[in-house]
Every structure is written in structure tokens, then in C-alpha cells.
Image (cartoon, rainbow, N blue to C red):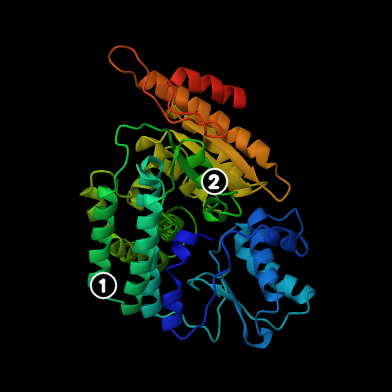
Amino acid sequence: MSPIHFQFFKQGFEDAGYTIEFLPSVDKLAIEEGLRYVHNDACYPAIIVVGQLMKALRSGKYDLNNTSVIITQTGGGCRATNYISFIRKALKDANMGHVPVIALNTGDSSNLENNPGFKFTIPMFNKLMRGLIYGDLLMRVLYRVRPYEKFPGSANLLYDSWVNRCQESLKKGNRKEHAENIRQIVKDFDKLEIHEDLIKPKVGVVGEILVKFHPTANNNIVELLEAEGAEAVVPDLTDFLLYGAYDSRIKYEKLSGSFWGMVSSYLSINRIESYRKEMKKALRASKRFHAPKPIEEIAKYAEKHLSLANQSGEGWFLTGEMIELIQSGVNNIVCLQPFACLPNHITGKGMFREIRRSYPLANISPIDYDPGASEVNQLNRIKLMLSVAIENLQNKIEQPMGAKVPLEDVSVDNKLSMLNLDTKLRECKLDS
């Protein structure tokens, strides 16, 4: 789902005795494969997930009598809970019904599956969480400096170097080395040479979790934004786990949740936050980066605008993320959603008017993704959003003598050099 994060998960499974392979992050042919087994009325992530798994199993690369499929399962009213059933039906239709499907979940809800034969152990959890923190941190620092690097490719080289070091560190499982690596990553990206005086519009990326992180599903949205002259800001994947844990509190307070579920929520949040304590500390001490907000604060942002009992899919968390971005100075947001994703259309797109009412500078654009969606339409929406972002920067940032601050070109061919904002804004509007 997320190449930056998932590359660090392999070690945790292998130490527990499992041979695991993560499927490619960019795989356009998987969409066509998915449409063979999943109706187009189902949500886009289901088509991609089933397509990737079936394409791999039909490739002849695996011994189907000694191969299983594993996928995360969050529970709740979102169709993602039923991906397990989608996959099993596809396997049956392809005469592969004997291949086991494992649901990676907490197993503490009535609509989640148990998996006899698969054990999710504490050592595995520790390594997966450390890998998750590495992924969040590297994503955060890479996206922050790459659009401004003085030497093209230098940010990616530093990132690749640290990926290798982090993967080696996970093999040892040393918590002290994990903390040292986190501090050094921040220091190294703090020292990377960038154009400090270059100003670009910041664009937050939120939405349905798979479309938000999966490069195939979102047509490489981060690379597109950077090519168009913007800086992409993607909230941490860890926040989604915290959102799921926090929901148990709300269920106890407002719905039909249990007391022990609420207690488990507090323990889970404290446990997860303990893994990123060192990351937050290092980011606060840096000169370029900002630390993530606690889930309680994000919940308070959302609670001003909708009930926290909205928990299907990304639920209230989607609204909370958008407001968190706006509060941190990122007024431009693309909200990625599978076409006809009901939770996102309600607690995402349905909240735009309310968010704009409370934050007049909010520049939010919904982008729908579907097997038949036009990439040209997606690009036009993004470019239109960027034209507004540049106009807002023009109004906000002016030099003392009235001259406009130069921004990097945002046209699709990206060939023009540094021009003033007025020229760029006209070109961007024409392109849109």
C-alpha cells in the first residue's frame, strides 16, 4: 500500500518464521486483473487489492499449495472490512479456493476474523512499529526537502542511504540504535543543501487510506505535485492506527462500546505513542521539520465541526486531518477518494463547505479515482487548485517595494525558469 512504509515490515515477519513478499507499489496491469473478479461498482481499492493478489498468484511464480495471502482488516462499516470476502470469491472463481486468506487485525471485534495458524507476536509488533516510525519519519523529511534541493537527486540519495541503514538496524532489533538513527536522520536532512529562500505552495494530501498512499491508486500524486512546482505534505500513517484506537473511547462514551474497550484504547494509544516519542523530540529540535500532533488534538479539531461518532472508513479523522493541515499553515489540500466511497463523500467532501466557512483561505479540491477515471480531469483539478494556491501566495507574500516573490514554475512541462507570480498565474490559468 505504501512503499515508503512497507519496505520496513519484511524483517518483522521473517524473524517470526514467515517468508513474506510485498507486492509492487506501481502495477497498472493489476487494475485490469481486478476488474475480471470485482464488479466496477465496488470501491477502487478493492479492485486494486484483488487485482494485485490474483495477478501474483496466476503468475506461476508461487507454489499455490504452500502460499497464503495476508491483508490488513480494520473492521467497521467501510467496505474494506469485506476485502477478505472479495479475495476469497476471486480465488474460488479462479479455482484457487484452497489458498488461505489471513486477516491481519487485532481480533477484538465481532466483525473481524480469527486466524488459526498465524500468530501475531509481541516481537513482531515491536519490529513492525519501529519500521512504521522509520517510514513516517523518512516520508516527512524527504517530502519537505526534495522540492527545494540544490543538487537534483541529492534528497533521494540521502533517503536511499538511510533506507538501507534502517533495514539493517531492524535486523538487530536494538531499541537504542533505533533512537540514534531517528536523531541522525533528522540531523542529516536538516543539513541537506536546499534553496532556503525558494517559496512553493504546500499541498496537503488526505483521503481514503489506500488511495492516499498507493502510487498506482493515486497516479503518483506526490511526484505530480512536485513536478507542478508544489511541496506535498502527507500526514503520518501512524495517525490512522491512533484514530482506530481512539474510536473505542468514543464508542464507550456515545455509542455501545464497552468499558474495557475504552481502557484498551488508552493503553493502545500510549503504547503507539511510545514508539514515536523519540521522533517527535528530534523533529521539535530541528530547524526545518514539525512534529506530528497527538490524536487527541486532531479529534478536538474535528469535534468542532462533526460528531466523533462518524467512524466508517476514515470517519471524523479525515476532517481532523484537513483542519490539522490548515492549522499548520497548509491551506491547499487534495482529498483523494475512490469514486462513490460513501464514508469519504460524507465526512470528507461533505465537510468542505463547513471547513471553508471556518477557514476562508482553505483551498480544497476533491479528486476521484476509479478504473475509468480520466487522468486529464484529475490533472486539471490539481492545476486549478494550484492556480488558486499561487494567487493566495501572491496576495500574502510581497516584498517591501511591491515586487512579487518568485516561485518555481508550475506549468505541466516545467521548462520555464523563475518568473514573477503574475506571469505564472496567467500561465497556470491558461493550462487549467
- Coordinates of residue 78 in the picture (x, y in percent): 60, 57
The CA distance from mark 1 to mark 2 is: 34 Å
Q: Residues within 10 Å of mark 2 (few under 14, many from 20)?
A: many
Residue at horizontal 61 percent and vertical 80 percent from the top: 68
Disc 1 secondary structure class:
helix
- Decide: is 122 above or below 50: below
- Coordinates of residue 35 in the picture (x, y in percent): 75, 59
The answer to which of 4 and 34 lies nearer the viewer is 4
Residue at horizontal 70 percent and vertical 73 percent from the top: 88
Q: Which image quarter holds the N terminus?
A: bottom right
Name which residue type carries label 2: Ile
Instruction: Name the N-terminal-most of marks 1 and 2.
Output: 1
The answer to which of 134 and 405 lies nearer the viewer is 405
- Decide: is 168 above or below 47: below
What residue does disc 2 label?
221
Look at the numbered discs 1 and 2 and tell me whether their residues touch, using CB distance below 8 Å: no
Numbered-mark total:
2
In terms of image quadrants, where is residue 47? bottom right
Q: Which image quarter holds the C terminus?
A: top right
Tell whether 404 sits left or right of 356: left
Residue at horizontal 36 percent and vertical 66 percent from the top: 268
The answer to which of 106 and 392 lies nearer the viewer is 392
